[in-house]
Amino acid sequence: MAAALCAGSLIAYALERQGAVAGANPSVGFDWQPALLGTQPWRAWAAAFVHYSDRHLLANLAGALGVAALGLAARVPVRSVLAWALAWPLVQVGLLLQPGLQHYGGLSGVLHAGVAVVATHLLWSPSRTQRRIGMAVLAGLLLKLLGEAPWAGVISHPSGWDIAVAPGAHVSGVLVGCVLAALAEAAHSGLRSVREALGAIDAHD
């Protein structure tokens, strides 16, 4: 997932640079625009590849590598990767709750979803240490979201950034990531219980 997100972002950025030389603006053809969801639903995926500055791209590439490292350290299973993949387009769809955001691009919402997926997986771990790590990561995400004050407006202009930031995308990412990861873990636990019950019946017979 991280490799796919990084590769897509680099390709989209190269196209953007070529378009800028030709006087075009390719990002408008790929970024998230809520009014076009019905006719161009693929933007829910493509928007993650759109970056509006060099700093925006570099920060998100570093973030993608960080999420990948976190997932590897937590040894997340395939179900967590699938949950993250499903979160990818749903993060953008969640932005429908903020109709004032007419354009959006970048990996940050999807990356927040990835961190939330890993943290939620850790909460299901039988290890107390891993559960504590999961709670700490989720607490860190919550503090970050509160610090960004998403209720203050659709976009913000943090110091040091050369683009506007959409805090709602981060909120959407965390919520979608947590919900999908929880569903994945619950489904896995249910299937495991069924297999154990069937095994007990076979052993009894």
Image (cartoon, grey):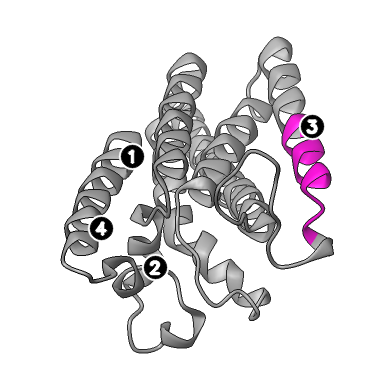
Do residues under tags 4 and 1 come within 8 Å of each other at their CB atoms? no
Q: What stretch is highlighted in magenta?
A: 139-150
Q: Where is residue 114 in the image (x, y as percent from the top left)?
A: 51, 39
Q: Residue at x 28, y 35 (%)?
A: 3
User: Residue visible at 50% across and 80% down?
Assistant: 34
Query: Looking at the rendering, which quadrant does residue 167 occupy?
Result: bottom right
The residue under label 4 is 16
| Residue that badge 2 annotates | 31
Badge 1 amino acid = Met
Q: How far apart are marks 2 and 3 (CA)?
A: 30 Å
Residue 139 - label: 3
Locate the C terminus and report the quarter of the image it occupies.
top left
Amino acid carrying label 2: it is Asp
Q: Residue 143 lies in magenta, yes or no?
A: yes
Dot 1: within a 10 Å radius of its alpha carbon, few (fewer than 14), some, or many (20 or more) residues? some
* Disc number placed over residue 203 in the picture, else none: none
Question: In the depicted view, which residue is nearer to us: 163 or 12?
Answer: 163
Q: How crowded is mark 3: few (under 14 residues within 10 Å), some or many (20 or more)?
A: few
Q: Main secondary structure of the magenta part?
A: helix
* 3D distance between C-alphas at marks 4 and 2: 12 Å
Q: Can residue 12 be seen in this view?
A: yes
Instruction: Identify the residue position indicated by label 1 in the image.
Output: 1
User: Does the image show residue 190?
Assistant: no
Q: Earlier in the sequence, mark 3 or mark 1?
A: 1
| Image position, residue 19 (x, y; %) | 20, 63
In whole angstroms, how far apart are the C-alphas of marks 1 and 2? 19 Å
Residue at x 58% of width, y 48% of height: 177
Say what amino acid the circle numbered 4 marks: Glu
The Cα atoms of the two marked residues, 3 and 1, are separated by: 24 Å
Q: How crowded is mark 2: few (under 14 residues within 10 Å), some or many (20 or more)?
A: many
